[in-house]
Image (cartoon, grey):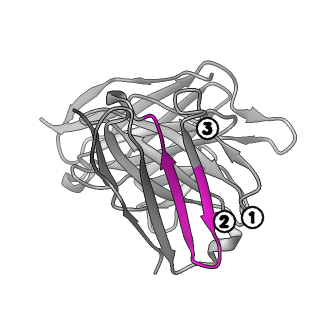
């Protein structure tokens, strides 16, 4: 199974700060035939279902603010929030869909400083 | 508007069975893979099962293989999860989710509100 490791597990932030969080996979998520990284980022607010933010490691979903930026390739990925807003306080999960079993990281919780 | 509505959760004793349903609307159901994902209380997300567009292919992690069965009825726009031999570690909120891509991409762009399953004597 592909193991997904997210760091940090939690982060205290202030509104307007730039935030970065990491996701590392135990094997490459880059599929050589199409050059795509099979990595997604989800946001889950308290009491809500997860929301897809980013697919293919860096493709923002329609309607997702452009302050959310996904980057990385292979085994190392990053989600950056360029200027955190109060509504961004949530848990962020990365997930690999390169192979079954699909696996998620343990999440990074953004909290208010 | 895409909607996924799960039903069928509840309290069940260890070793018993439960069947979840997810009714979909707002998209061409028969053209999308569907998934069940679960989340134990206060924990992270775990993929539970996947089913392809015509129901002919299904996938499970080892933790539920042989106990859970996913199926779909494209005429009724519904996906099911039959859960047998339930264990306390199956206690979780179960989410139904839709594949993002037409026919298949592997990630999920819409999730239901979730249904709680509690396995306890």
Labels 1 and 3 within one chain: yes
Pick the front one: B70 or A22: B70
Q: Which of the numbered marks, if any, corresponds to residue A113?
A: none
Quadrant of the rendered image containing residue A63? bottom left
Residue position for label 2: B32
Pick the front one: B111 or A84: B111
Which segment is the magenta one? B70-85
* Percent x, y of residue B71: 61, 57
Residue position for label 1: B54
- Tell me: residue A73, above or below residue A44: above
* Percent x, y of residue A104: 49, 33
Q: Are marks 3 and 2 in contact (CB under 8 Å)?
A: no
Going 53% across and 33% down the picture, which residue do you hit?
Answer: B64
Q: How many marks do you count on the picture?
A: 3
Q: Is residue B71 magenta?
A: yes
Going 59% across and 27% down the picture, which residue do you hit?
Answer: B62
Q: Which image quadrant: the C terminus of chain B?
A: top left
């Amino acid at each position: 199974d592909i193991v997904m490791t997210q760091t940090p597990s939690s982060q205290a932030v202030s509104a307007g700060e730039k935030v970065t969080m990491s996701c590392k996979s135990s094997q490459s998520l880059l599929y050589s035939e199409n050059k795509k990284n099979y990595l997604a980022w989800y946001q889950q607010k308290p009491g809500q279902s997860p929301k897809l933010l980013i697919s293919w490691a860096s493709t923002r979903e329609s309607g997702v603010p452009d302050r959310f930026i996904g980057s990385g390739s292979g085994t190392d990925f990053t989600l950056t929030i360029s200027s955190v807003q109060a509504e961004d306080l949530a848990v962020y999960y990365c997930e690999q869909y390169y192979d079954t079993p699909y696996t998620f990281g343990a999440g990074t919780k953004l909290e208010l400083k | 508007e895409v909607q996924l509505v799960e039903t069928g959760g509840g309290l069940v004793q260890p070793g018993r069975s439960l069947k979840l349903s997810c009714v979909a609307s707002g998209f061409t159901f028969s053209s999308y893979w569907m998934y069940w994902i679960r989340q134990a209380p206060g924990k992270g997300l775990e993929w539970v099962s996947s089913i392809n567009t015509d129901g002919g292919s299904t996938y499970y992690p080892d933790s539920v293989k042989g106990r859970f069965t996913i199926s779909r009825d494209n005429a009724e726009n519904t996906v099911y999860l039959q859960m047998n031999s339930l264990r306390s570690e199956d206690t979780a909120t179960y989410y139904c989710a839709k594949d993002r891509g037409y026919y298949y991409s592997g990630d999920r762009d819409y999730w239901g509100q979730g249904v709680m399953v509690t396995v306890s004597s």
